[in-house]
Amino acid sequence: MNENIIEGRNAVLEAFRSGKPVDKLYVLDRCQDGPVRSIVREAKKHDTILKFVDKERLNQLSGTGKHQGVVAFTAAYEYAEVSDMLKLAGERGEKPFLFLLDGIEDPHNLGAIVRTANLAGAHGVIIPKHRAVGLTATVLKASAGALNYTPVARVTNLARTMEELKREGLWFVCADMKGEIMYRQNLEGPIGLVIGNEGDGVSRLVKEKCDFTAAIPMKGNIDSLNASVAAGVLAYEIVRQRM
């Protein structure tokens, strides 16, 4: 069984009550007895992603079949707060440099981006709670240890978080094929680099919060890079300009 899976009613309820960060909760559809209602109540209180599924799906997630109608996925690593990242920048005497990931779903991509963020000297990575992968064991492994040094925060609303960070002096650039070539842009100063979903790119609401868009020059026959590769290319142009 994967190290970030908890199954069984008592175990899941105890996870919530002990403060363990639970990312997702899967509940057997139409199962509404007392213990399950208590677990669902805890999930809603903690803003956990809640999904009602059939028994076949629950058995697939469980692996043991001893789930008692509930399977929870907990974070393999503890989430930070956005304020921790700004504090870290201050302690280093540096202008904030953050990665904001708008709906990255592949755990290998997320792990690779966290690794890049660490090597590029970024102060943290911000991800949304919904429609995106969390800090699973696969992400932890793919980061090659970077999660031990680079804080990752999970927020309910990415666009709102960007508004709050703008009040702290940050401005935002997002990766977009239709933007201006990144080498022609000023990427210095306190900055947030926004990387979109593997298929759909940056969502409309998040893009509207960006100050401008940056394009990576492409010379080949296909029109896009893997999300983690795009993050690396743009991040190191920011590093070059900040040196």
Image: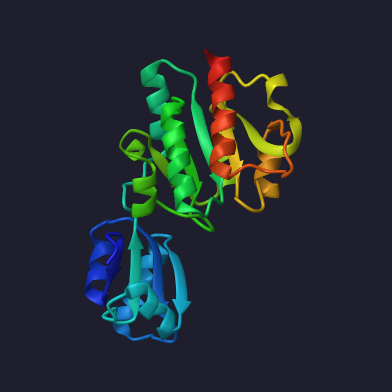
Taking the view exactly as shown, the residue that stands out farthest to the front is 221
Q: Is residue 81 above or below residue 216?
A: below
- Viewport quadrant of the N terminus: bottom left
Residue placed at 34% from the left, 47% from the top? 141
Q: How many marks?
A: 0
**Image x and y of residue 235, in percent:** 55, 28
Residue placed at 50% from the left, 53% from the top? 106
Residue placed at 27% from the left, 56% from the top? 19
Taking the view exactly as shown, the residue that stands out farthest to the top is 243
Task: Decide if residue 76 is in sight here.
Answer: yes
**Image x and y of residue 208, in percent:** 71, 41
**Image x and y of residue 22, in percent:** 35, 60
Q: Nearer the viewer, residue 58 or 92?
A: 58
Task: Decide if residue 136 is in sight here.
Answer: no
Q: Nearer the viewer, residue 187 or 1?
A: 1
Q: Quadrant of residue 188?
A: top right
Q: Quadrant of residue 42?
A: bottom left
Q: Is residue 20 above or below residue 72?
A: above
Q: Nearer the viewer, residue 178 or 216?
A: 216
Q: Is residue 127 left or right of residue 202?
A: left
**Image x and y of residue 234, in percent:** 59, 30
Q: Is residue 113 left or right of residue 146?
A: right
Residue placed at 52% from the left, 55% from the top? 105
* Colour pattern of the rendering: rainbow
Q: Is residue 99 left or right of residue 159?
A: left
